[in-house]
Amino acid sequence: MLLKRLTEASGISGNEWEVRNLIINEIKDHVDDLKIDKLGNVIAFKKGKEIPKKLMITAHMDEVGLMIIDVDDKGYIKFTTVGGIDKRILVSKPVLVGDKKIPGVIGSKPIHLQMKEERDKAIEVDNLYIDIGVDSKEEALKYVKIGDYITFDSRYIEFGDNLIKAKALDNRVGCSLLIELIKEVEDISFYGVFTVMEEVGLKGAGPAAYSVDPDICIVLEGTLCYDVPEIDSHFIPTRLNDGPAISLIDKTTLFNKALREKIVEIAKLNDIPYQYRKSSMGGNDSGKIHTTKEGAITATISVPCRNIHSPTSVMSRKDYENTLKLLKAILCEYKKGEFTSGI
């Protein structure tokens, strides 16, 4: 399955090559132009009916993870985080180190030896280490080196009522949706762009947007979902099984009202469930895209994901399927020339 292969691939910010190669192999026979820019963004063009306003659909390839910064005399690896990771989720997690994917486990001082004040708070990253099963620095350096990336070792699992558990659903879910659009939608001209380094400051999106210079951009994302116990409803940005989430505002973008209303109208006309992303927290590539050159009108459509930025994110297959339906309906309207009216 495509989403399984995408989530189990390694692609931490700045090291997206494995995911990029997978994507290229999937789309190369379905696009009319394909290039990789200097930063590593994949910019694909699918030729069809020409529309006066240029459309770009984008999803970032990278995931959060770790990087080696030191190896001590006993062969334990010290690391830093790449992207936003809650330090509380790190202890005892299995990981894969470097391009050779050496297995390891994140450890810390045993709880039996911790003082009470240590047990009452999350352990700082500086006090964690990775054990790869060696007993000296020299032995460790036969397998790993300073600067190697470290990914969570987490398998794709389907469970419960159409739920999926995996790492990197932010944003391999968006990549998967965009790949399916490129493969399945015909006779419509649009750019499909897979960006790098979103998780470390939206680094790839600006240059990609500068190159394409779109009039309209739809950003595809896996977004935060807090439909869990003991949280008041107004703090819950999205819910599983309520459909694709349409963003209102975040820390990088105040999304275009007319475009958002057009997307909602299309969802209603096609009986596709949808919800609003009711939070201004976070941000995505729109933050750079909508201000590049003369600017672009943007919208973000997301699949809700519990436990985001962790090895065990959870999403609903129903939400994925309804998001794909909505995107296809949008492109159908775009092809008719009606999607851009009033925007």
Image (cartoon, rainbow, N blue to C red):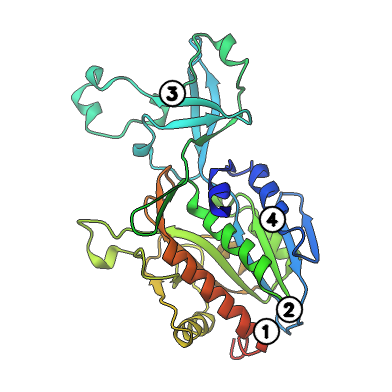
Q: Secondary structure at mark 1?
A: helix
Provide residue 272's location: percent of width, then percent of height.
Answer: 44, 79
Mark 2: secondary structure: loop
Give the amino acid at mark 4. Glu
Q: Earlier in the sequence, mark 2 or mark 3?
A: 3
Real-space CA distance between mark 3 and mark 1, rounded to the nearest whole angstrom:
53 Å
> Which badge, 1 or 2, comes first in the chain's sequence?
2
Point out the frontmost of discs 1 and 2: 2
Residue type at mark 3: give it.
Tyr
Residue 56 or 69: which is nearer the viewer?
56
**Residue annotated with mark 2:** 187
Residue named by callout 3: 129
Residue 26: give its label.
4
Whichever of labels 3 and 1 marks the residue nearer the N terminus, that label is 3
Count neighbours of disc 3 (C-alpha within 10 A) and say few if under 14, some if 14 to 19, many if 20 or more.
many
Q: Is label 2 or label 3 in front?
A: 2
User: Label 2 to label 4, Cα distance in Å?
Assistant: 19 Å
Spatial CA span between label 1 and label 4: 24 Å
- Which one is earlier in the sequence, the residue at label 1 or at label 4? 4
10 Å crowding of disc 2: few (<14), some (14-19), many (20+) = few
Quarter of the figure with residue 2: bottom right
Quadrant of res 190: bottom right
Q: Amino acid at mark 1?
A: Lys
